[in-house]
Image (spheres, rainbow, N blue to C red):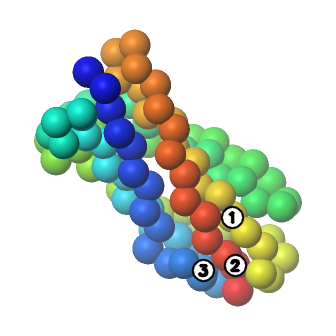
Amino acid sequence: TDMRVYVHVTLKQAPVGGAQFVKVSVDDQNQQPLKDVGLVATIKSPTEVRSFPLLPTDANGVAAFAFDVGKPPPNSMIVVEVNAQFGSNSRNAREVFTVK
């Protein structure tokens, strides 16, 4: 099974010290959702890198999470990268947002 991973941040600009909301969706080569995909998120800012496991995807192939943006310098670019593992398949996807 080939898989495709999509990462979508709710806020293209997030406030310093605020929260960012992320939706991850995973589907197969036939655009069918994949359930129980293991996910690890990595948040990369100029001041730190944080990684943490997420709950696996649900029956709709979706997982959602929120995180504290922290205190990076204003106008910083933050990368949200998600690694998905399903059986022997592994894929990454990422989205970028700025801090205001």
> Is the residue under label 3 in contact with that under label 2 (CB below 8 Å)?
yes
**Left of 54 or right of it: where is 59?**
left
Above or below residue 26? Residue 71 is below
Q: Which residue is mark 2?
A: 99
Q: Secondary structure at mark 1?
A: strand
Q: Point out the tag, 1 or 3, that comes first from the N-terminus.
A: 3
Q: Do the numbered discs 1 and 3 sit on residues whose CB atoms are within 8 Å?
A: yes
Name the residue located 76 percent from the left edge and 60 percent from the top edge: 45
Residue 95, image x, y percentages? 55, 59
Residue type at mark 1 is Ile
Above or below: residue 40 compared with residue 42: above
Nearest to the observer: residue 99 or residue 52: 99
Residue beneath disc 3: 14
Q: Earlier in the sequence, mark 2 or mark 1?
A: 1
Q: Can residue 55 be seen?
A: no
Q: Please state which amino acid type lies under the numbered disc 2.
A: Val
**According to the image, label 1 marks what residue?**
78
Which amino acid does the dot numbered 3 rest on? Ala
Is residue 100 toward the left or the right of residue 65 in the image?
Answer: right
**Quadrant where the image shows the N terminus:** top left
Q: Residue furthest top?
A: 88
Distance Cα–Cα, label 2 vs label 1 = 7 Å
- Does the residue at mark 2 contact the one at mark 1 (Cβ under 8 Å)? yes
The alpha-carbon separation of the residues under discs 2 and 3 comes to 5 Å
| Residue at the (69%, 47%) spot, across then down | 50
Q: From the viewer's perspective, is 38 left or right of 67?
A: left
Q: Is residue 26 above or below residue 85?
A: below
Look at the numbered disc 3 and give the secondary structure of its residue. Answer: strand
